[in-house]
Each structure stands twice: as C-alpha cells, then as structure tokens.
Image (spheres, rainbow, N blue to C red):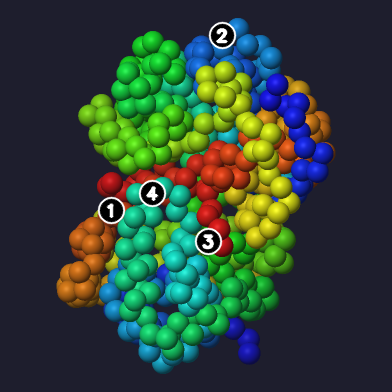
Amino acid sequence: MPFSEDLPCAPEVALSHLDHLWFQVGGTLCNLTCNHCFISCSPKNHNFGFLSLEQVQQRLEESVPLGVKEYYFTGGEPFLNPDMTAILVETLRYGPATVLTNGTVLRDDWLHTLRDAEANSLYALEFRVSIDGFSPETNDPLRGAGTFDRALRGVQKLVEFGFLPIITAARTWDIEQEAKTVEAFVNRLRAAGYARPRLKILPTLRLGAEEQRTHGYEDTERITAEMLRDYDCSQLVCEHSRIVSDRGVHVCPILIEAPDALLGATLCEASRPFALAHGACSTCYQYGAICTNPSSAVAGN
Amino acid sequence: MTRTRIACLGGIYNNYLALESALNDIRRRGVDGVYCLGDLGAFGPHPDRVFPWIAEHGVQCVQGNYDDSIGNELDNCQCGYTDPRDNHFAQISYDYTLANTSEPNRRFLRQLPREIRLELGPLRVLLCHGSPRKTNEFLWESTTPTHFLSHLAEAHQADVIAATHTGIKWQRELARGKWFVNVGVLGRPENDGTTHVWYTLLEHSTANRLQVQFVPVHYSYQRLAREMRQERLPEEFIQTIETGWWTTCLEILPSKERRRGKY
C-alpha cells in the first residue's frame, strides 16, 4: 500500500504562489495500459472521471485573481475526453496550455482547430507526447505492442500541423546510458521527419503499476526537516502547483490517489501547506521540476 | 530629479561593440538615465572590455544571474536551463567569462543590487533581471499571462516592470495603466535572422502613459565574430552572431518562440 506508511513528523511545504494549475482532465481513463503508470490508468480505470468544459471554465475564472501562470492538462489520456479540444481553445484565452498525451488518438480536425486557436492566441500550446524508448523494442514492453509506431505517427501528425511536441520519456534505462539513449532518441525522431526534436526525461515514480513492475518506496525514502535545510523548495511541485480533479483540488499530479493530497474544494482552500509524507516526494526532491516544461523550470537562484 | 525618459539595456553578454554603439546612440538621443538590467558577461569575447563603457557613461546596473555567479565565482551561470544540451554550451561560455573577468570587475558585479526602483514622471518603475521575484525566471511572451503580470505589478508595487533574461524583447499593457516590458538584449541577435540587437527607451508622455520604443542597434558584428574566433569560442556562438539565428540554448524556448527561429 503506497499511502499507508506515512511518517508522523513529515516537514510541511507552503504554496509560495500558484504558478501551475493542473487539470486531471482525462481522469484515469486511458486507451493504453502502461506497466509503469504511476496511477495505473487503463481503459477500465474509472477511479477519476473526466472534467467537463464547464468545470474547467469555472477553475480558469477562479485562477485569474490568483495570478496563475500556466495551465497543464493530464490524465489518463486527455484526448479521450470529448471536451478536450474545446477546453484547450478556452484555456488559450487565459494563458499558456500544455497537454500531456500518448499521441495515439489525435485527429486531424482537432489539430486544425487547435492550430488556429494557438495562432489567434498570445499564448503557446504545448503538446507533450509520452514515448518511453527510441524503438519498439525499448518502448513497447512498457507501453504495449505497437505503441511506438502509433505514437511516432502522432508526433509526425503534430509536426505536420506545425507543432513542436515535447517528447517525454520516463527514465527506465540506467543513468549511465542516458547520453546514448537521448542521442538515439533524437536521431530516431529526426529520421521520422521531426527536424528539431524536443525531449524531456523524467524519473519513474514508484507508485501504481510501476510499484508492481519494479518495487515501491522504502520506509527510509522520506523527506526530513533536515533535508530541507538550505534546499531550494521551489524545485518541489507542491511549492507552486495544485491539480483539479473531479473530486476537488489536490496537491500535485503525482499524488492524486493519496487521501491526504486532496486539500479542498476550491483553489483557495487548497492553498494550505502540505506535509511531504510520501515516498514519491523523495523523487520530486531528488530530481526537481519533474512535472513542468523546460521553458518554465527554474533551477536555483 | 524628475525623469521622463530612460534607456534600458538588457543582457550585454560581453558584446562591448554593441554596447558602444548603443551608448553612442543613446547620447545622441538624450535621456535622463541609462540602466543595464544585468548579465554583463556571457557568450562573447573579452569580458573586461564592457566595464569601462559602463563606468564612462554612468550606467546603473542590476545584478543578473551571470553577474552574481561571476562576482561570487560560483560553479555555473545559474541561467536556469534544465536540458543538458543547453547546459553544455552555457558552461563553455561561463568558464571562459569567469577566467577572463578581472578581480576588480568581479567585485563590481558582486555588489550590484538585485533591483532598481525609480520614478518616471508619476510612474513607479521596477527594473529587474528575470522577474521581480526571481533573478533567473524566464518571462516569455507566449507563456506569461496578463493576469500573472498584473499580480506581479500589484505584489511588487510597481506601475512598470522592466526585465530581460530571455533574450527576446516584448511588451504588454496591463490593466489600470500598468506595463510589463522585456527590454531585449545587446548581447546577441534575437533569433530572427538579422544581425542587429536591441535596447529600449521608456518615456512618460504628457498623456500620462508609458511609451515604449525598441531601438535596433547596428554594430560591427563581423569584428565581434572575428574576435570570438581568435578567443576560440564555439563556432555555434559565432554562427549566431553572423546569421541572427540561435544555434544553442534552444531547449529553453517555448514552442511559439522556437518556431520563429531556424533551429
């Protein structure tokens, strides 16, 4: 049980400012069943439901007086939500939008609409496409048979529409192999017609399906007050983010299933501090800025 | 002193030739003050050649992340890049600049303020490097909502916030007569295929409004490129000076800004 071993004296982190507002817009429903998914999304997982356009609109309005800087949309697979295109179009009236997709269900008419919406907006629309290896041999064992080729076709489609998707890969290789893996990734994407590939490498989170694939967090993998001394807490997602689901507002996209991570019904209620009691907090602590786009992440200073 | 017109210089990045051209242009136009919003070093050749121009023209400087790093001899530039490909080239530039900045100039950088506040007519102006809240925060045009900028202006009690750090100029009028201005940089062209660089004039007009004028600066970029080659700086940097297209530190760009470039 990933959420039953919390330490009683976990240090708290305050929300300094709500920079990044996330939406669990696709719930936990996904057309794929990746065996490293930290919230075990699948075609049958209805644990969290979709957010409607109306629900998102209400949160966007709520976010304006709070001075939110960026909006992120995740799932599940966001594009299974029938309102997804309309939600992104609406969001681009408020600020920059980023959507995390597996790239396998994108339709031309949606991309036409989104291309026009971005062109008419001050703000950027970013696509982050999850591919976890630079070949079917490295990706498909994690994400399912045929998913590498399907996701790559999605990337090609996005590029044809003028987008520059950020390919997001969970680090399921040894860190010593990082440089070679990234190089192979870049070469494979270029060969597929993506001339200036953008990449974001993420650590794996040992929750959900990933806990079964490898192992969960040890009791010792917890953040202590001592560890936060002289640490730049702005590296922690909970210091500048919150996420809206169909249940309310949670502390971060990683912990939505943890009961203590549901902080309130409104963004204001959810602005209270959060105790870093979870093993996954140690991954966030170790790597920093794991959820944000490269253009938003700030290292130190 | 009542100021009505000031000049703001963004990152100089060792480009003393562009600085010289900009300061000569500013002198011809006439202003009530010249300000640099930080990052005197980086990218270009001969860091120490910037400082005499700063002193001679009485340019008041904000401390950028680079200035803090060079001044305090830190390990890296604190530019805020997260991609290894960006950091690779940033480190080459930083190591060169640190090795070639004299101790008196490092001392100068060390003592610079993180922000400067002044009045332009009745407008409260806040000059900073990245953002008022964080020296190395990137405020890109396409990823910075108007309501976020209004929040910054309110929280920091400013009518006008001027910043640099991203390397690309932009401006936006906010609610209730407030403004945000990214003043651009003198250090390198802004990824648009032209070789000139930019500084910014801020003026309080009689209509009680802010007037923002971005001014192109033409300089001997061929000479800068020649000196960069002599200093054995990376050919990728020189290509940017000669073509106006960014070739390095591209991963930090949001998609809208990146699409406007060549690479």
Residue B84, numbered circle:
4
Residue B196: x and y in percent read: 29, 67
Q: Give the mark, 1 or 3, whose residue is nearer the N terminus.
A: 3
Quarter of the image holding residue A189?
top left
Residue annotated with mark 2:
A43
Front-lying residue, A192 or B242: A192
Work out how far the residue at label 2 is from the one at label 3, CA to CA, in angstroms: 42 Å
The kind of residue on which mark 3 rests is Asn
The kind of residue on which mark 2 rests is Pro
Work out how far the residue at label 4 is from the one at label 2, CA to CA, in angstroms: 36 Å
Q: Are marks 2 and 3 on the same chain?
A: no
Residue B65 vs A90, above or below: the answer is: below
What is the total number of numbered labels drawn onto the structure image?
4
Work out how far the residue at label 1 is from the one at label 3, CA to CA, in angstroms: 21 Å
Q: Are marks 2 and 1 on the same chain?
A: no
Which mark is nearer the camera, 4 or 2? 4
Find out whether the residues at labels 4 and 3 contact each other: C-beta distance under 8 Å. Answer: no
Q: Residue furthest top?
A: A44
Q: Residue at x 40, y 31 (%)?
A: A173
Residue annotated with mark 1:
B247
The kind of residue on which mark 4 rests is Pro
Q: Is residue B224 left or right of residue A222?
A: left
Residue B11, numbered circle:
none
Tell me if I can see residue A29 in this picture: yes
Q: Are marks 4 and 3 on the same chain?
A: yes
Q: Give the mark, 1 or 4, whose residue is nearer the N terminus.
A: 4
